[in-house]
Image (cartoon, rainbow, N blue to C red):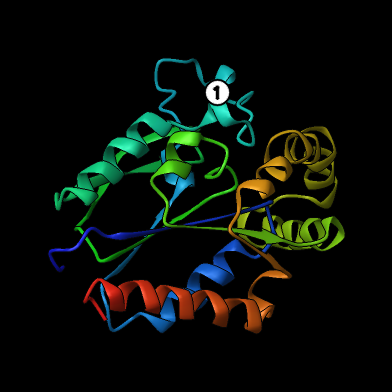
Amino acid sequence: MGTKTPLIIGISGGSGSGKTSVTNAISEVFKDHSVVVIQQDYYYKDQSHLAFEERLNTNYDHPLAFDNDLLLEHIQNLLNNQSIKKPVYDYAQHTRSSETITIEPKDVIILEGILVLEDQRLRDIMDIKLFVDTDSDLRIIRRILRDIKDRGRTVESVVDQYLSVVRPMHNQFIEPTKRYADVIIPEGGQNEVAIDLVVTKIKTILDSDGIV
């Protein structure tokens, strides 16, 4: 970690848009440098004070589901060259786990999540803001395949959740944040040209800071 202020990159987009692919592509380029990825998903609010039945009603696609206060505090700590204990979310219990992951300060911080551009406080500390823009039919197909394979869901349950929660929340809260992006990346990780342009910009900033 150098003496310069870390570069903060925000990567947003709908569920199944390819945010993680873009994040991985950028991280791979700078793997020989000092990079850390902070997923907004780790910062869902603690719900241990609620009965389990109440936790089941949580809308994870709504801005209020996230503890952005803690996320901001942790990013500020990293900016001040202090390590953090990143929370871990227990999806089986629908609340925060007692475990944490220690994260050390890095030269590049990638903040990834569906709603990282929704909170102005988060936007204000980002140096580069990206929005991964992928057609809704591709996003729902990816979500179906992921949830069946990784989470043991049925097609019916995934589609029902998509129509009742994911789609309306995307239209209401996620899609409008596209206007805050410095760069909109169509088709996510498949868009090598857009990723190359972003990587070049990151290198320019790091070089001017004497990090690269």
Asked if residue 30 is positioned above or below residue 109 in the image, the reply reads: below
Across and down, in percent, residue 121 comes to: 43, 35
The foreground one among 57 and 87 is 87
The three-letter amino acid code for the residue at tag 1 is Arg
Across and down, in percent, residue 91 comes to: 51, 41
Tell me, yes or no, if residue 93 can be seen here. Answer: no
The foreground one among 162 and 38 is 38
The foreground one among 78 and 7 is 7
Asked if residue 119 is positioned above or below residue 75 in the image, the reply reads: above
Q: Is residue 72 left or right of residue 13?
A: left
Tell me, yes or no, if residue 54 can be seen here. Answer: yes
Across and down, in percent, residue 80 comes to: 16, 48
User: Quarter holding the N terminus?
Assistant: bottom left
Quickly name the residue at label 1: 55
Across and down, in percent, residue 182 comes to: 58, 58
Query: Residue at the location (60% across, 26% down)?
Result: 58
Asked if residue 16 is positioned above or below residue 168 in the image, the reply reads: below
- Regarding mark 1 in the picture, which secondary structure is present there? helix
